[in-house]
């Protein structure tokens, strides 16, 4: 068992450094890269997905149960942070798989510059801020020893991955939109320039920005459109499981309540786009707000709430 734990630690560190290198590749402008570096970047994300897969498989082997929920007990308080490390790893892997799929079926090669920083942030939490006690695998509590575990938790995490990607695109839209409107330097040059070449370059730049904003808005809509039905399925399967385990479909547990709030926020997002033709900045504000709600639902409940889902609560 000690050998497996050492191997797990090594693999976790390799995942962290590989994520960091992959992020640097995506943040570095592709037009400044040679063909070799571009090829390495595309292969690096595939390697990263395999590393996270092997890490999940290794934790599955060590725990003898599907690595999505483990009882984490700790008597110490370290920055009031308690996160299910298995779910974090699975979320990172889901984000990577989603990025690979989207990059393979679309021409949106910039998605990695948005997604990889979040993966690195999650890896930083698990590697540097979680005490070692939280990383130990322990047996499942009786309520979690159910066939519903794989279905419910995996669907919920996949929905979070898709919704996080969509929300990040909305945040990026708001950021680019704000910077474009506040770019007084370009406006001043545009008003004062008499050179046709300068005006032509600025016009071309504005067209590129508008196209990029459209891609961000459209990507956000599509990814939230994928994540929302998955979230719906996850909530419904959780209700059925709760009835089998505790005799009640809904108990207003903090996790259940915030999952419902998350569902309502993204339902409003999709409804306003479909029924009221919202797009661009207005819908991106809703999508950005949804990211905050996801963070509260996914991690915040384990920090401040006590309930049936708060297995990582520090006592």
Image (tube, helix red, strand yellow):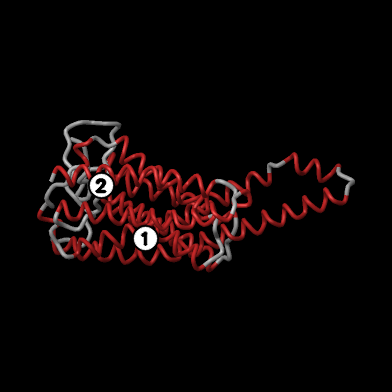
State the SS at label 2: loop
Q: Residue at 40% of width from left, 48% of height from top?
A: 119
Q: Residue at 90% of width from left, 46% of height from top?
A: 194
Where is residue 237? Give x, y as percent: 25, 65
Q: Earlier in the sequence, mark 1 or mark 2?
A: 2
Where is residue 137? Give x, y as percent: 16, 46
Where is residue 202? Give x, y as percent: 77, 50
- Nearer mark to the viewer, of 1 and 2: 2
Give the left or right position of residue 86, taking residue 169 as reference.
left
- With respect to residue 205, does 313 lie above or below? above
Q: Quadrant of the C terminus?
A: top left
Find the residue positioned furthest to the left: 142
Where is residue 138? Give x, y as percent: 13, 47
Q: Which residue is mark 1?
A: 159
- With respect to residue 130, does 51 lie above or below? below
Distance (Cα) linking label 1 and label 2: 17 Å
Q: Which residue is mark 2?
A: 84
**Dot label at residue 30:** none
State the SS at label 1: helix
Task: Tell which of 188 and 262 is nearer to you.
Answer: 188
Task: Tell which of 199 and 59 is nearer to you.
Answer: 59
Q: Residue at 59% of width from left, 50% of height from top?
A: 33
Q: Residue at 24% of width from left, 35% of height from top?
A: 131
Q: Mark 1 packing: few (<14 Cα in 10 Å), some, or many (20+)?
A: many
Find the residue positioned furthest to the front: 36
Q: Mark 2 packing: few (<14 Cα in 10 Å), some, or many (20+)?
A: many
- With respect to residue 52, does 273 lie above or below? below
């Amino acid at each position: 068992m000690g050998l497996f734990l050492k191997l797990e630690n090594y693999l976790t560190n390799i995942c962290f450094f590989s994520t960091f290198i992959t992020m640097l590749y995506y943040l570095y402008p592709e037009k400044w890269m040679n063909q070799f570096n571009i090829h390495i970047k595309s292969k690096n994300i595939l390697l990263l997905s395999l590393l996270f897969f092997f890490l999940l498989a290794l934790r599955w082997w060590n725990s003898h149960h599907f690595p999505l929920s483990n009882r984490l007990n700790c008597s110490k308080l370290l920055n009031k942070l308690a996160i299910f490390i298995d779910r974090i790893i699975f979320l990172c892997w889901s984000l990577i798989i989603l990025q690979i799929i989207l990059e393979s079926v679309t021409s949106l090669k910039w998605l990695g510059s948005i997604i990889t920083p979040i993966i690195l942030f999650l890896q930083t939490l698990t590697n540097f801020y979680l005490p070692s006690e939280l990383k130990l695998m322990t047996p499942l509590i009786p309520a979690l020893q159910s066939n519903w575990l794989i279905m419910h938790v995996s669907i919920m995490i996949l929905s979070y991955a898709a919704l996080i990607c969509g929300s990040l695109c909305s945040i990026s839209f708001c950021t680019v939109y704000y910077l474009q409107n506040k770019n007084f330097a370009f406006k001043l040059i545009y008003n004062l320039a008499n050179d046709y070449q300068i005006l032509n370059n600025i016009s071309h730049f504005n067209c590129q920005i508008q196209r990029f904003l459209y891609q961000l808005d459209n990507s956000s809509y599509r990814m939230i459109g994928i994540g929302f039905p998955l979230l719906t399925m996850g909530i419904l399967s959780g209700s059925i499981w709760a009835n089998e385990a505790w005799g009640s479909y809904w108990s207003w547990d903090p996790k259940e309540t915030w999952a419902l709030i998350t569902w309502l926020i993204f339902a409003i997002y999709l409804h306003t786009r479909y029924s009221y033709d919202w797009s661009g900045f207005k819908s991106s504000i809703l999508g950005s707000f949804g990211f905050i709600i996801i963070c509260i639902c996914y991690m915040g409940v384990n920090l401040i709430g006590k309930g049936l889902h708060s297995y990582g609560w520090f006592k």
